[in-house]
Image (cartoon, rainbow, N blue to C red):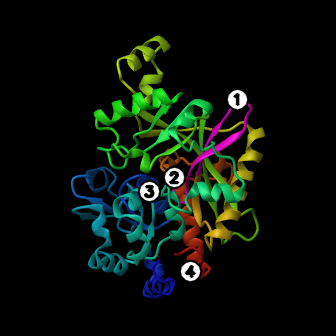
Amino acid sequence: MIDRNQILTNLKKYDLKKAKIGVIASHSALDTCDGAVSEGFRTMAVCQKGREKTFTNYFKTQRDTAGNIIRGVVDECLILEKFSDVLCPNIQEKMMENNILFIPNRSFVSYCGIDAVENDFAIPMVGSRNLLRSEERGDDKDYYWILNKAGLPAPKEVKRPEDIDNMGLTIIKVHHKQKKLERGFFTAKSYDQFCQKSQKLIRDGVIEENFLESARMEQYIIGPVFNLDFFYSPLEEKGEKIELLGIDWRFESSLDGYCRLPGKQQVELEDDGILPEYTVCGHNSATLRESLLDEAFKLAEKYVAATKKYYNPGIIGPFCLQTCIDKDLHFYIYDVAPRIGGGTNVHMAIGHSYGNALWRCEMSTGRRLSIEIKKAIEQERIDEIIT
């Protein structure tokens, strides 16, 4: 892990009155930038050549002569040949000269690699740098390890394919062979079905032959999905430090189209060897019945406590607990994002029911992040939210 003193030394060179918010131009970047301009910050989107027009053209800011925002959310675009070029020392130096406070998202880690993010990225980062590794499934202290230490509910792990016969419906989580940042997930209700489906997916180029080496197999929870978008504020002194800002759920291709077909046609497709894929392509907003909110906050409290104990200083800012709820209204956490979630663009500009109710204004995750940064600068406590 890069030495904290190096980060703080770099931070001391900043003119924080001119601080800008920087982010990889993917994932939840629009929410991050929208929240930043709403709170008076300038923004920089780090773009990959060939994928920049959304940010350079369609969401480019226009400001009046006094600098007030008229339209758009992206002030500057740094266009690189590939996202991972943000690790180049000269690029980092340029960003620090621009007083960039960097917001990590999943695309940042996916394109740059967790080792480089931990060891080579010297730009002051808002959030928990050391917790980003917990998303690497299979690592010794991944988020399943944290959930276990925290006593949080998660789907039961299936150790061997042969055990599926005793467990019942199982989801096999594995990376897509062709789409490196996407999923090659599939389900199986028996060992025989596991063998049939996996061989089919290998032949179709969806998963690697050695997929089991990095796969996570677990009980499939039948129930709706709720991604709980929380925020933890180290700076808060009067109210609760844990906030529920919003809830989202995913659209997955080709799963969603598959599910809209009558059951008979789904069976016919499976008989023909056509299996749904789980590629996330969008999100929508949701709320929970109020009797479940207490349980949702208990999950967050336990997670925050565990991160403080095992990943000092613990979670900072936004995090997302991705959950399913079974027929008895029990939560199961199947994934954890220790940074801004992938679905927070549903909050963008309009906020979310929970964040709005709490803060009495349109409160998105991106805006809440920038409020925290502004508060840290004003109170000269920026070091408490930087890693």
Amino acid type at image mark 3? Arg
Q: Identify the mark nearer the N-term, 1 or 2.
A: 1
Question: Main SS type for the magenta part?
Answer: strand
Instruction: Residue under label 1, please give it.
Output: 327
Which residue is painted at 46% across and 20% down in the image? 260
Which is closer to the viewer, label 4 or label 3? Answer: 3
Q: Residue at x 69, y 41 (%)?
A: 331
Q: Residue furthest front?
A: 162
Residue 329 is a magenta residue: yes
Question: Magenta stretch?
Answer: 321-340
Q: Nearer the viewer, residue 64 or 44?
A: 44
Is 191 placed left or right of 269 in the picture?
right
- Which of the 4 image quarters holds residue 204? top left
Residue at disc 2, secondary structure? loop
Residue 106: give its label.
3
- Considering only order in the chain, which callout, 3 or 2, is on the residue closer to the N terminus? 3
> For the residue marked with disc 1, what is the amino acid?
Lys
Report x, y in % for residue 32: 46, 58
Residue that label 2 marks: 341
Residue 20 visible to an observer of this rendering: no
